[in-house]
Image (cartoon, grey):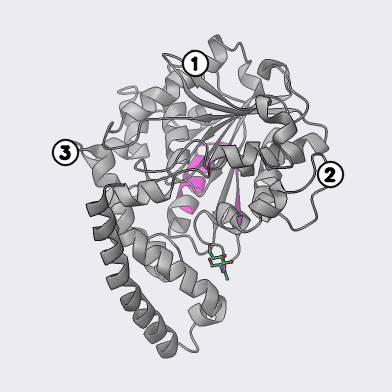
Amino acid sequence: MPVRATIVSLGMVTAAVPVILVSLLARRTRGLASDEVAEISFKEDLNRSLARGLLSILPLETIRRFFKARPVKSIMMSRRFKPFMDQLFIRVNSETCNGYWICKGPPGKPLVPKESDVVLLWFHGGGYCFGDPLRPAVNLLRVAEIAAARGISMSIFSVEYTLAPAATFPSQQREAVAAYQYFLKDEGIPADKIIMGGESAGAHLLLSCLMGPPDSLPRPKGALLLYPWVNLTNHSPTFESNQHKDVLSKRLLDRCVERAIGERGRVDALNLENLLKQWKPGTEKTWKGILPAYTWVHVGSHDVFLHDVTTFVENARKDGARVDLDIADKRPHAWNFAVDRDWVDLYCGLRPRTLVPVGMMPGSAAIAEGFFRVFHQGM
Ligand SMILES: *[C@@H]1O[C@H](CO)[C@@H](O)[C@H](O)[C@H]1NC(C)=O
Ligand SMILES: *[C@@H]1O[C@H](CO)[C@@H](O)[C@H](O)[C@H]1NC(C)=O
């Protein structure tokens, strides 16, 4: 990072932290009987307030650097994964598809992807402005292990797409469609073996991708949406009611939208409802026609997206799509990844193939449960 930018960012952090602390204390003293205080411990509130406050003010470039993936080398060289290192994180850099095979078959049981029981195509989050296809790598490896333990062999590919401002929407939609076509055609994976998964903006991209392909492209087997960013207006009632509970802020999200659509863009261009309408003029697509046979959606009750996600699920069901929604009590945005962060070193230090203690990597375990729902089509 350039020295000047570092100094500016450090200065901003130093100036902001006391302000965040004072307003946190004031809010908690004022609201001693309120549900916020009852619902969130002080430590947790402090964590979320700092995250929210700093993400609101720091330049997006700084956030992008901060949100880089944990070096994959440390995972590859860890006790648990070192024996399989030549099977993990395999880069694909083709004309139509970029990203990484996180694993081809479960760690230690390599397979050609099209021969595994299922291929999970992952779209990472980060507001179209940050994030990295390898950032959820450890969590996804854990999901593959849990699936293998239940007799399902899984290959996982994490898609790399161009972030704003280097590219603005809808070029990410085109990249996602091209990637999906690559798996169907070049890798020869049948659509009914593909499950698409995405978090936050990645879930928005996943939905845009499903809206993008011409009708002749087959639907995947299912979709898994974690805290999907479905309405980029960032203006629903839970933006207000969860403003002190979540790690996200309207300010951060609005900045991301501005950058994702670029100078000449309009927020309409990112609006899924408008994408629905514009795809085939006159013949408005419905969610039933867009979503796969089964979709599982997950969001925390403290997420600012809660209301928009609930509305999306209601609309999709009205259209006749099969969608299940699980709301995690008192969880903020991206909680699965946050709760696992403290476990990663312990987990990677376990011997290969040994049982993972109950309670370790709980966020990934919750993603795996969602995956099973999709794999078994909601049964
Ligand atoms: C607060 O964040 C730190 C750093 O991510 C983490 O180690 C700690 O467990 C968090 N505390 C709570 C209560 O979530
Ligand atoms: C998106 O949010 C805005 C503001 O809350 C709302 O007016 C609009 O109806 C929402 N769109 C959908 C599709 O729910």
Q: Examine the image and state in which quarter residue 24 appears.
A: bottom left
Q: Which amino acid does label 3 sit on?
A: Glu
The 10 Å Cα crowd at callout 1, few under 14, some 14 to 19, many 20 or more, is: many
The 10 Å Cα crowd at callout 2, few under 14, some 14 to 19, many 20 or more, is: few
The residue wearing badge 2 is 354
Q: Distance between the residues labelled 3 and 2?
A: 52 Å
Query: Closer to the camera, 125 or 203?
Result: 125
On residue 156, the disc is none
Under tag 3, what secondary structure? loop
On residue 181, the disc is 1
Q: Nearer the viewer, mark 3 or mark 2?
A: 2
Q: Is residue 192 left or right of residue 42?
A: right
Residue 192 visible in image? yes
Relative to 313, is 329 above or below? below
Q: In which quarter of the image is the C terminus?
A: top right
Q: Is residue 149 left or right of residue 306?
A: right
Q: Does the residue labelled 2 lie within 8 Å of ligand 1?
A: no
Find the magenta span and give its range.
310-327
Q: What residue type is labelled 2?
A: Thr
In the rendered image, the residue lying farthest to the front is 3
Q: Nearer the viewer, mark 2 or mark 1?
A: 2
Q: Distance between the residues labelled 3 and 1?
A: 30 Å
The residue wearing badge 3 is 263
The residue located at (61%, 11%) in the rendering is 188
Which comes sooner in the sequence, label 2 or label 1? 1
Does the segment drawn in magenta span residue 105?
no
Does the segment drawn in magenta span residue 316?
yes
- Residue 364 image position (x, y, % from top left): 66, 48
- Residue 182 image position (x, y, % from top left): 50, 15
